[in-house]
Image (spheres, rainbow, N blue to C red):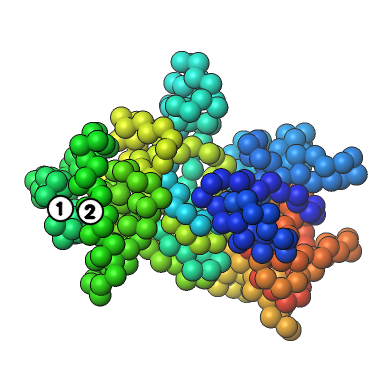
Amino acid sequence: MDRLVNTVRPYSWGSTTAIPELLGQAPTGEPQAEMWMGAHPGAPSRIDRGQGPTPLNEIVAADPEGELGAECVAAFGPELPFLFKVLAAAAPLSLQVHPDLGQAREGYADEERRGIPRNAPNRNYKDGNHKPELICALGPFEGLCGFRPADESAELIAALDVDELKPYADLLHAHPEDAALREMLTAVLGADRAELADGLAHAVAAAERLGAEDGPHAAAYAACAAAAHHFPGDPGFLAALLLNHVRLNPGEAMYLGAGVPHAYLSGLGVELMANSDNVLRCGFTPKHVDVPELLRVVRFEPGDPAVLRPEPDEPDVEEVYSTPVSEFRLSRYALAPGSVPARPTGGRPQILLCTAGGLRLREAGGEELALERGQSVYLNATDNVEISGEGTVFRATVSL
């Protein structure tokens, strides 16, 4: 087992205090948005096996089967198939979607063929992988996820009572639901920002007012208006009104599959995803928005976002967040004094993150390692450990 040294990404939307508090460090005053745990080449974790800190992707590349196990390599290739993060949002992330595996492979190959640099601002596909993801709240967490029914979105927009927006509400009534949502989003993203500016300003003010009242959609209005203040004049405000507003309590999670539009608005959570950084943006962002490619990837399917709660996995003390993907599996152990020690199944790569208390890991050979709040460890396919103590640890691995 190897203790991880992780990179914290300083994106502008990050909290200045949440990740430092988790790590037991003094805030620097700069935003700290994401702590990456894994082997993604953009910010790989580092481990020290006696030769100094070495990026985890280099460790895996040197012996894929020894690190990941033959079954994992056969299923996903010679790379760690998941990326684990701590995410701390003090301001909204962009409205975005992720491609499915076929779209990612096709888009990546096309951009490589056209010679678009991977760090170019107009680059959509950083790799050829899909990016299903799961966010689990460590505290109160707020976001937007998936389309509302078109008629309900029309009601939200109509209630703002802004003349310039009435054509958008009419679009949502004019077609079958999937076509209505597609036409509405197309119109929003293609609108002239200067012509839409006054209507947007009035709409945001109206949403702020309705958010302060006791209506059925008050929380959604308030959340969308608050997000809009971070991005004045951004038509993403109208796109946000098409989406379900979600609040997660600590321990609750939300799964996001391919093509599902979403945005994280605020809060601290652990995030687990396939090992990819492919994002197509559609609002609340100064970055590139590729409207044709976005519309190709978005799934215009309304539905209620399912809030996931951990399910016991007997006979162990593990609680699992069930998702339909095999590249990752998130679970947690909440150990109280006198609890039966946890024994994570070996034979696969794993990352353990302590989010509360203090724990002790013991290998079959007798080696022990203390794991305090904010610390993480990597277990390769040959590691078998027992976890004891008092605290909470999240476990990221594959589902095979």
Mark 1 sits on what residue?
162
Label 1 residue SS: loop
332 sits left or right of 133 in the view: right
The answer to whether residue 9 shows anywhere in this view is: yes
Q: Nearer the viewer, residue 107 or 42?
A: 42
User: Hey, which quadrant is residue 305 in on the image?
Assistant: bottom left
Task: Using residue 171 as the reference point, say whether residue 280 is left or right of it.
Answer: right
**Could you tell me which secondary element the residue under label 2 belongs to?**
helix
Q: What is the number of callouts on the image?
A: 2
Q: Are marks 1 and 2 in contact (CB under 8 Å)?
A: yes
| Camera-side residue of 387 and 133 | 133
**Which residue is tagged 2?**
203
Compared across the picture, whether 218 is left or right of 138 comes to left
Mark 1–mark 2 Cα distance, whole angstroms, equals 6 Å
Q: What's the residue at 69%, 80% (across, down)? A: 336
At x 60%, y 43%, the residue is 81
Tag 2: residue type?
Ala
55 shown above or below 368: above
Whether residue 135 is visible, yes or no, is no
Of 33 and 37, nearer the camera is: 33
Residue 18 point in image, percent of width and height: 60, 61
Q: Is residue 108 above or below residue 320?
A: above
